[in-house]
Amino acid sequence: MKAVVTVMPKKSVLDPQGAAVAQAMDHLGLKNVGKVRVGKSIEIELPEGADEAKLHELCRDLLSNPVIEDYELEIER
Amino acid sequence: MRFAVIQFPGSNCDQDVLHALRSFEGVEAHYLWHKDTSVGDADVIVVPGGFSYGDYLRCGAIARFSPVMGAVKEFAARGGTVLGICNGFQILCESGLLPGALVRNRDLHFICEHVDLRVETNNSRFTRAATPGTTLRIPIAHGEGCYTADEATLAELRKNDQVLVRYAGPNPNGSLDDIAGIRNREGNVFGLMPHPERACDPLLGSADGRVIFESILAERN
């Protein structure tokens, strides 16, 4: 089984990386780009029957910082 | 007073801190390894700057779970004095010992320069030897020094006089409310992005950082 955790900066937190990417896209000819936000995607190979509650705990404590980020956990069986 | 300076893989200001500390009278300073499970007989813990664990995932995210940080948390809970500098500040925020978080600088650049800091209060064990309103010239060197916190946290910080130093000149990194360093509510944990240990000798351009260590040392009881 595999898990994919998507970590994104919270809407309320400035994302200068996203702003810089939006600007670069504009320079490269894609006009009128709206907001761009940069996050990260973490793929995890898991043993069968891995503890989902524990996984959420680690998403909160390790993989994301709830002060500045939100996460989404997807489990592929 | 006994100081312990933590070394994580990737710390790079540990030796600077030790060198600076040893220039003060009455200081005994030694290292703690990240795998240590006790802080020993230290009176003060310094979490130095650098790139602990390569800054992987987020700055301080992995250091937070190191064995020594468990001991530092217990030490802080007992009222022990903890100073976090730069990456050390990031680690203290990740650990929950300080509120808020440090994110990428507004302009995305790594900034390495001397900045002016305003001492906002001397009602703390980290600034008691300074005069409020004084400007300190201390270098910064970081890519993720933009302090951020939600409105409620910022209101708390202001209400309890927890912002000890602010950027006095132009805000270098976009930090919320020009915050350069904060203490916890109880007053025994302080984190700041600038490097006072790099401003402890006039030969290095400024000795303004000494007042932070002098303040800690003023508590000789």
Image: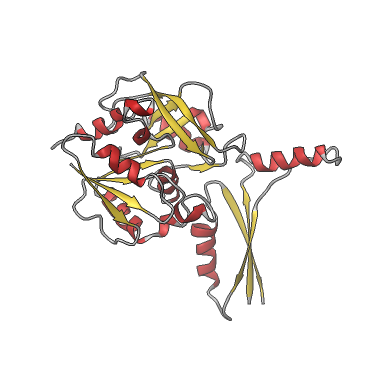
* Residue at the extreme bottom: A48
Q: Is residue B81 left or right of residue B115?
A: left
Image location of residue A53, percent across then percent down: 52, 69
Given residues B151 and B72, the one toward you in this image is B72
* Quarter of the image that includes the N terminus of chain B: top left
Q: Quadrant of the C terminus of chain B?
A: top left
Residue B69 sits above or below residue B179 on the image: below
**What residue is drawn where x is 46% and y is 38%?**
B153
- In this image, B191 relative to A65: left or right? left
* Image height of B1 relative to B159, above or below: below
Measured along the vertical axis of the image, is residue B154 above or below residue B72? above
Q: Percent position (x, y) of residue B8?
A: 39, 55
Q: Residue at x 58, y 50 (%)?
A: A69
Q: Relative to B120, is B43 above or below?
A: below
Please report the residue visible at 64 percent of the width from the left and 73 percent of the height from the top. A2
- Give the residue furthest to the front: B203
Furthest-left residue in this view: B221
Q: What scheme was used to colour the molecule? A: secondary structure
